[in-house]
């Protein structure tokens, strides 16, 4: 699967019209550089473009991949793609992870509540709110949050992952707090856009499990309410865990919009910039990492499900 | 939670744990918005580097496309080009305090600032300049070309004394941009970069620039070795920043770079801020966001739409500085697409299009309508050719004249719509790249005006600039937008019209013309044309002459090119850009005035010139 995606993205990015040398040349001209100086600077870029036929480039690329070499960036001449990608990836992980976990927790809790109150106005209101927000794309919510909380009421910063003038990276309270402060809005955009899905799924799952005989049997056996609640929760939440694992991978791909809106320097922003500058190696590297994240998430989902569901283990 | 189906709420323990977890998140976040560190006297100046976005993993190297060497801050050139209308050799001093130029322009003697030091405290000497030239050779281009016969190439670099270096052009083809190209050289420390150069580097340069046919193989090998060194150097990242500029790089993250004042800078007492924070961005929108939230002390104008400009200027203490910009936006034609091969058609379109309307819609804040199509911005044209500008055709709106020209060209108006000689409707598309909001708006307005006139025109967009550029070079568009008048060098300005894009290529003293549709010739204009009062003119040859002529002898050539451009209209100049810089005086004051010759330079250079000081507390 990785080979298929690698091959597909390799050819796809090279089929894109435009070439990094010309893009850079015209950008430098627009900045006011003389044509001579612009030519000189782009001549260097040319040296970092892969040459030879597309097939020889493909073979070279695969061979390098087997040696865990993602190549060098064309735009940041000579800087290894791996350096740029792995520097950006953790920030995307922070956002995606926090966004999903927050949405999961909120969605699951509210979903249980909505299921238990499903005949009441409160339960219906929760379901409707969840449905509406679930239908709104994350980037729309992102724009809204940005407009409200950085412009209308400037409570949060308008970009970046931490204030480098105030804190230096490290595992200490001020730095972690600053990172959390900068991540609140983008993570909230993810969370608000996706909690509705968890709410509806959990509501449905709880409602389904509530009618099962084993719960009635547990009550008849005199088990405590806490124990019965545990039975309910564990059975109702089972299907959501696999979706949770898969959604980690899928969100990587969607990070490009949120990171652009909040100027959050993760993998999405890196990918966006490399597309604009036709940095072939960078695009291939970023797509590969996103693909691997999705595949890893799927594998994790399979393993997780077999771990938490004894019925699957026994099968 | 309800008691329905025997479900009980979680225990007190679990509730407590949940509250503690939530409190932790809130506390962490609150830590992030706690009190800032106390500000030093000079404070932290916040802006963006318009040159390129920041990449934390890029090296501290000005030659790297994303290098964390920021022009004017921790990376400086020998001097800084003034925004002059007609003198491309006018510069503010940089590391070069002054320079002497021989009468024929072939020798330049640089005098280094006497107090110039690197940020590690060591002296900045002529040897550093020589090493900088060596590194520039490895990157090639402009005066640092090794190809024998290249116009204006550097011949020799000689250290005269500890603070004096002499540069001599190679014999053969001179180029009057020699001084300008030289002064644009990055100044690098020998202590850091010398180890990256081959030990026999200057021998390789001598060998590589040899024109002796018997040495051709050795020369090529030498040039290949230098190119290989160049590739290594561009990716080279010194472990720490050794800067000759007013700042030194402290730290860089994916969202910003922080630079601290360099106490060894030769003019450190002029530098106001103690630190500079350069915010990162992937597009103009992020810069607009920073400006509208008042986070930047200054930033350049980046094709900002009018409504965003209004929002920016509403921010407390925000304002703008305006000045000269030698760039024009023009509607370009691909003359391989009929009827644009007919001069009368291009002229007719010029008589139809109300350029002031196009400018008001396309670039209301950062543009002035182009009064004439001359290949130069209006002010530069007036300075260069004086009264001759008044003799150029302004192509004021005259629809009757336009109709007459179209009829002469064989077109006909049928039912209110213009048709080509064969009877097919005269219709075309104006292509612009998406994201270039001014070009998009301008193109739509032109399309609207022409459609009202009876020519069905549609403005269409390419996915991005890279696609646009590729397809334009491949000749896929009948019409599109193009930047011209890139001064102050008139050679550079006219090369946009009569250079590679129109078939002319100059190399080794020879000028050749490639046919339309080949080797990047997408304009497809005629190689020569007869112009009233001038006879037969070859604009490519005239443009090439501009690269050779001393500036004070260029007027006649410029007059001919202006008249040719005005008569032949390979493009219609729509508007001339105005340089706009946004500033906010909440924290800093003493920004450059309007029309300052420094406006196109980075704000680090502004600081070197004594501008930008912390605001005095009332």
Image (cartoon, helix red, strand yellow):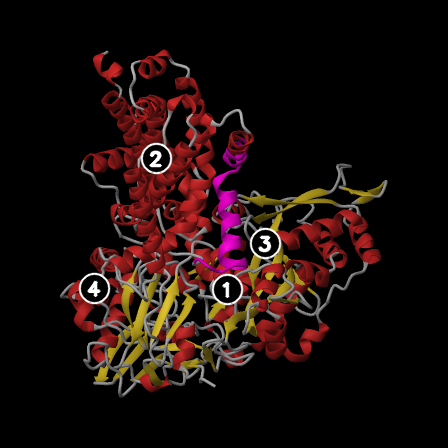
Reply above or below: B405 against B112: above
The chain to which mark 3 is attached is B
User: Which secondary structure lies at badge 1?
Assistant: helix
* Subunit under mark 4: B
The label on residue B238 is 4
The residues tagged by marks 2 and 1 sit, at their Cα atoms, a distance apart of: 34 Å
- Rendered residue at 37%/76% (across/down): B43
Judging by the rendered image, the residue that carries numbered circle 2 is: A248
SS at mark 2 in the image: helix
Q: Nearer the viewer, mark 1 or mark 3?
A: 1
Helix, strand or loop at mark 3: helix
Q: CA distance from mark 4 to mark 2?
A: 38 Å
**Would residue B539 be found to the left or right of residue B100 on screen?**
right
Give above or below for A141 relative to A149: above
The picture quadrant where one finds residue B56 is bottom left
Along the viewing direction, whichever of A255 and B431 lies nearer the viewer: A255
**Same-chain check, marks 4 and 1:** yes
Task: Say whether mark 3 and mark 1 are on the same chain.
Answer: yes
Magenta region, main secondary structure? helix
Q: Earlier in the sequence, mark 1 or mark 3?
A: 1
Chain letter of the residue carrying label 1: B
């Amino acid at each position: 699967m990785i080979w298929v995606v690698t091959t597909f993205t390799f050819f796809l990015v090279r089929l894109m019209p435009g070439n990094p040398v010309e893009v850079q040349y015209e950008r430098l001209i627009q900045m006011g550089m003389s044509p001579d100086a612009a030519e000189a600077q782009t001549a260097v870029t040319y040296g970092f473009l892969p040459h030879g036929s597309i097939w020889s480039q493909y073979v070279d690329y695969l061979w390098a991949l087997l040696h865990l070499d993602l190549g060098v960036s064309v735009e940041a001449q000579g800087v290894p793609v791996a350096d740029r990608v792995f520097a950006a990836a953790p920030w995307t992980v922070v956002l995606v992870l926090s966004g999903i976990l927050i949405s999961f927790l909120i969605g699951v809790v509210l979903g249980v509540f909505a299921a238990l109150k499903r005949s009441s106005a409160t339960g219906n209101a929760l379901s409707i709110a969840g449905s509406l927000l679930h239908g709104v794309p994350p980037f729309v919510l992102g724009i809204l949050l940005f407009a409200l909380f950085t412009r209308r009421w400037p409570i949060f910063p308008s970009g970046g992952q931490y204030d480098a003038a105030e804190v230096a990276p490290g595992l200490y309270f001020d730095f972690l707090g600053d990172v959390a402060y900068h991540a609140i809005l983008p993570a909230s955009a993810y969370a608000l856009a996706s909690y509705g899905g968890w709410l509806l799924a959990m509501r449905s799952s709880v409602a389904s499990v509530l009618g099962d005989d084993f719960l009635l049997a547990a009550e008849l056996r005199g088990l405590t309410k806490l124990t019965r609640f545990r039975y309910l929760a564990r059975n109702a939440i089972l299907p959501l865990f696999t979706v949770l694992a898969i959604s980690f991978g899928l969100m990587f791909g969607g990070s490009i919009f949120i990171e652009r809106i909040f100027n959050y320097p993760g993998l999405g922003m890196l990918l966006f910039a490399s597309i604009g500058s036709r940095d072939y190696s960078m695009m291939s590297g970023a797509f590969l990492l996103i693909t691997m994240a999705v595949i890893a998430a799927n594998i994790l989902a399979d393993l997780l499900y077999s771990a938490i569901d004894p019925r699957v283990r026994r099968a | 939670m309800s008691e329905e189906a025997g479900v009980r709420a979680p225990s007190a323990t679990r509730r407590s744990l949940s509250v503690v977890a939530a409190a932790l998140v809130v506390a962490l976040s609150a830590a992030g918005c706690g009190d800032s560190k106390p500000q030093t006297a000079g404070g932290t100046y916040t802006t963006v580097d318009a040159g390129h976005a920041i990449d934390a993993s890029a090296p501290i190297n000005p030659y790297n496309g994303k290098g964390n060497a920021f022009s004017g801050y921790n990376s400086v050139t020998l001097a800084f080009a003034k925004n002059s209308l007609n003198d491309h050799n006018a510069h503010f001093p940089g590391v070069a305090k002054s320079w002497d130029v021989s009468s024929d322009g072939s020798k330049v003697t640089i005098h280094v600032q006497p107090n110039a030091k690197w940020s590690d405290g060591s002296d900045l000497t002529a040897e550093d300049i020589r090493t900088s030239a060596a590194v520039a050779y490895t990157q090639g281009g402009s005066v640092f070309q090794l190809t024998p016969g290249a116009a204006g190439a550097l011949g020799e670099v000689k250290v005269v004394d500890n603070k004096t270096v002499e540069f001599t052009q190679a014999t053969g083809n001179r180029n009057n941009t020699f001084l300008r190209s030289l002064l644009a050289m990055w100044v690098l420390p020998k202590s850091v970069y010398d180890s990256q150069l081959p030990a026999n580097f200057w021998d390789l340069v001598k060998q590589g620039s040899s024109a002796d046919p018997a040495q051709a193989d050795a020369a090529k090998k030498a040039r290949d070795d230098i190119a290989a060194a160049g590739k290594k150097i561009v990716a080279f990242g010194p472990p720490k920043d050794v800067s000759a500029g007013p700042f030194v790089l402290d730290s860089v993250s994916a969202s910003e770079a922080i630079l601290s004042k360099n106490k060894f800078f030769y003019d450190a007492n002029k530098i106001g801020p103690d630190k500079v924070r350069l915010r990162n961005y992937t597009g103009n929108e992020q810069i607009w966001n920073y400006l509208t939230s008042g986070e930047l002390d200054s930033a350049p104008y980046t094709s900002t739409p009018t409504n965003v400009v209004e929002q920016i200027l509403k921010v407390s203490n925000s304002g703008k500085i305006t000045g000269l910009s030698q760039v024009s936006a023009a509607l370009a034609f691909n003359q391989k697409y009929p009827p644009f091969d007919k001069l009368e058609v291009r002229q007719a379109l010029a008589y139809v299009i109300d350029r002031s309307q196009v400018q008001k819609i396309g670039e209301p804040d950062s543009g002035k309508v182009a009064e004439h199509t001359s290949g130069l911005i209006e002010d530069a044209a007036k300075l260069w050719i004086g009264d001759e500008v008044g003799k150029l055709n302004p192509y004021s709106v005259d629809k009757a004249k336009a109709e007459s020209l179209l009829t002469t060209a064989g077109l006909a108006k049928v039912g209110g719509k213009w048709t080509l000689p064969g009877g097919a409707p005269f219709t075309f598309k104006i292509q612009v790249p998406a994201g270039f909001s001014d070009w998009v708006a301008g193109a739509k307005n032109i399309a609207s005006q022409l459609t009202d006139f009876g020519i069905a025109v549609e403005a269409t967009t390419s996915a991005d600039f890279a696609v646009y550029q590729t397809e334009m070079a491949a000749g896929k568009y009948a019409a599109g937008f193009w930047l011209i008048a890139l001064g102050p060098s008139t050679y550079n300005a006219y090369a946009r019209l009569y250079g590679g894009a129109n078939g002319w290529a100059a190399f080794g003293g020879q000028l050749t013309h490639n046919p339309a549709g080949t080797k990047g010739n997408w304009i497809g204009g005629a190689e020569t044309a007869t112009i009233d009062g001038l006879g037969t003119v070859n604009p490519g040859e005239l443009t090439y002459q501009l690269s050779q002529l001393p500036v004070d002898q260029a007027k006649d050539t410029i007059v001919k090119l202006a008249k040719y451009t005005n008569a032949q209209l390979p493009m219609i100049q729509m508007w001339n850009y105005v340089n706009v810089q946004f500033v906010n005086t909440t924290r800093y004051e003493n920004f450059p005035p309007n029309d300052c010759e420094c406006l196109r330079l980075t704000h680090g250079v502004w600081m070197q010139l004594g501008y930008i000081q912390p605001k005095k507390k009332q």
